[in-house]
Image (cartoon, rainbow, N blue to C red):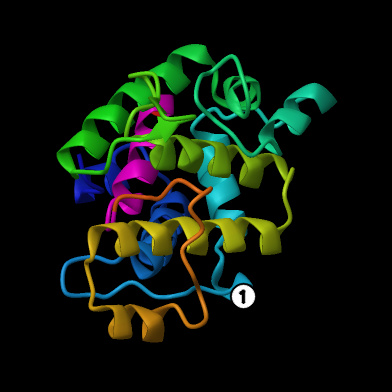
Amino acid sequence: MSISSEMLEKGSEPESAEALKKVTRFLEMVSGKGELPPRLVGVSELPLEEIKTLLKESGANLRIGEAEATSLRHTQFRELDQGKGPGVVAVFGPERAEEYLRWAAEASKEAGMPRLHYRDKPVLESADRSRGLMHFLAWNAAVVTGVKSPEEVIVELNQRAYNGHRAKNTLPPEKLAIMFPEMKRVTTMASFPPGILPEAFAKIIESGER
């Protein structure tokens, strides 16, 4: 699934369609698209209000408790009942979250993302290969609830995108160093599959509109 003209037009107010275009362009910048190379993005480029508007319109719950907010600040996300999971469920609901995670697992497998291990053992199949896209769902939950600051969400977005391009060797190291100046791979942060963030965001919106 990709962000199509049908998605932009179906049942959308002009403001919502324009907001989706703006968010898509932003995610293409950091994720890369076709011949468009990825690059570091700054806080001033973050379409924060547009992301919040689209997630609210798709049914995201903004009223979460302190326990769920604490969950979204967690560094790990392997299952919906631990780490960032409870916070994600509070924002998107269990069915919507589970649908997205099923899609993320398949999309990550198709993208050829490496298998993940924890303490020298394979991660559970539900999180295998797809931890980066799992964290993208949690990233959106943190954005819409304001649990993390714009500075925090930009740092995470850039790092996970960079890690993905580094892992998949989508650009020569010298070119990647230019597009993401002074960044180094952080092995404790799961990576996004290159080029997939616009599609992932569309999946999140779509799953809430049915």
Asked if residue 201 is among those painted magenta in the image, a careful observer would answer yes
Q: Quadrant of residue 120?
A: top left
Toward the front, the furthest residue is: 120
Asked if residue 73 is among those painted magenta in the image, a careful observer would answer no
Q: Residue 154: horizontal and vertical position, in percent?
A: 59, 62
Residue at the image point whose x is 47% and y is 30% from the top: 118
Main secondary structure type of the part rendered in magenta: helix
Residue at the image point whose x is 29% and y is 29% from the top: 105
Up-down relation of residue 171 to residue 82 (above or below) = below
Residue 133 in view (yes/no): yes
Q: Quadrant of residue 111?
A: top left
The quadrant of the picture occupied by the N terminus is top left
Q: Quadrant of residue 141?
A: top right
Residue 210 in view (yes/no): no
The residue wearing badge 1 is 44
Left or right: 89 as drawn, with respect to 179: right
Q: Residue 196: horizontal and vertical position, in percent?
A: 29, 51
How crowded is the residue under tag 1: few (<14 C-alpha within 10 Å), some, or many (20+)?
Answer: few
Q: Secondary structure at mark 1?
A: helix
Q: Residue 35: horizontal and vertical position, in percent?
A: 16, 74
Residue at the image point whose x is 53% and y is 18% from the top: 80
Residue numbers of the magenta segment: 194-208
Identity, as a three-letter code, of the amino acid under mark 1: Ser
Q: Residue 201: horizontal and vertical position, in percent?
A: 39, 44
Left or right: 129 as drawn, with respect to 94: left
The front one of 101 and 206 is 101
The quadrant of the picture occupied by the C terminus is top left
Up-down relation of residue 181 to residue 199 (above or below) = below
Residue at the image point whose x is 39% and y is 19% from the top: 124
